[in-house]
Image: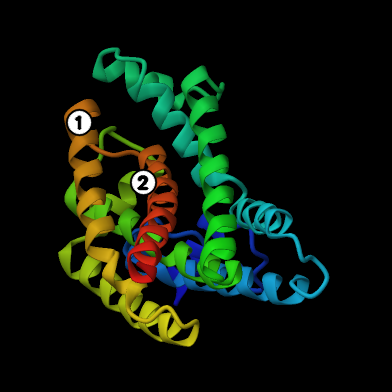
Amino acid sequence: MKGLVLLFKFMTRLPFPWEPKFDSESLGKSMKWFPVVGMILGLINYGIYTLLSGIIPSPVIMAIILVTMDVIMTGGLHLDGLADTFDGIFSYRSKQKMLEIMKDSRLGTNGGLVLVLYFIFKIALLVELSNDFGISQGAIMALIPVISRLNSVGNCTFAPYARGTGMGKTFVDHTKMPDFIISIVISVIYLYFLGIYFGMGLLPIMILPITIILGVYFAKLMTRKIGGITGDTLGAVLELTGVLGLFLIYIGCSLYMI
């Protein structure tokens, strides 16, 4: 329980009445519960959608609000990792130089570009899923945070840590295959019940193998590029998986409609 609370405190900006004493080992071992954090964020997203759907008919404005609230709840933590990762990897420098660039707090051109594309694709996919297939944006935003966070657990399982020290190292050191399996089981159960409830059937579960395979590929790519993963790349794979999940759901709906 302590580890899960620490994970909430570390990975979100949600208020929590209990302030546990920091323990890096407890935090590291809690990574298997990361999809649970996604569940809470997802259900909050759905709650926001439910409250506003009656007064905001525009799917574009609703999508912008939901995406904005998602950023607020995490403090942009993972988006910062996405931008830093693209700044480093696409600098085409040595491994050490890439790591230095990723640690730099300044935003570079590649980081700025990926953030712009990220928001364009995420908002556009939410709008089109609503317009083309009548799928509730609240339903989608209840599912995606779980799908995306599962890949962060997978990356901690399948790749070493690229630096000698760092907060991400505690997650990598304490996350093993049994932990990843626990995360998968938690995610599948959640996605199954919500998929049925929202009228999407097994589609959310069906896309998981694709997202997991590409997530593992991302971990191996980072290992080849910079010697492993970092806290930044964990944020990057989370956000990239979120957009990928939206795209796969869109493709799945298109095939189903055909």
**Corner quadrant of residue 227:** top left
Counting other residues with Cα less than 10 Å from the Cα at mark 1, is it few (<14), some (14-19), or many (20 or more)?
some
Q: Is residue 173 above or below residue 1?
A: above
Q: How many labels, in total?
A: 2
Mark toward the start of the polypeptide (2 vs 1): 1
Residue type highlighted by circle 1: Gly
Instruction: Say whether residue 26 is visible.
Output: no
Q: Is residue 100 visible?
A: yes
Where in the figure is residue 191, as x and y percent of width and height?
Answer: 38, 77
Which residue is painted at 58% across and 54% down in the image? 74
Q: Is residue 174 left or right of residue 201?
A: left
Q: Position of residue 124 (x, y in %)?
A: 56, 48
- Kindly give the residue lying farthest to the front in the view shown: 258
> Which residue lies under the disc numbered 2?
237
Residue sitting at 30 percent across and 14 percent down? 92
Residue 66 percent coordinates (x, y): 65, 59
Q: Name the residue at the top extreme.
A: 93
Q: Is residue 103 above or below residue 194?
A: above
Q: Which residue is mark 1?
A: 227
Under mark 2, the amino acid is: Val
State how far apart marks 2 and 1 are (Cα).
16 Å
With 27 as the anchor, is 74 left or right in this view? right
User: At 18% from the left edge and 70% from the top edge, which residue is drawn?
Assistant: 178
| Numbered disc in front, either 2 or 1 | 2
What number is the disc on residue 68? Answer: none
Secondary structure at badge 2 equals helix
Toward which corner of the image does residue 252 lie, by quadrant?
Answer: bottom left
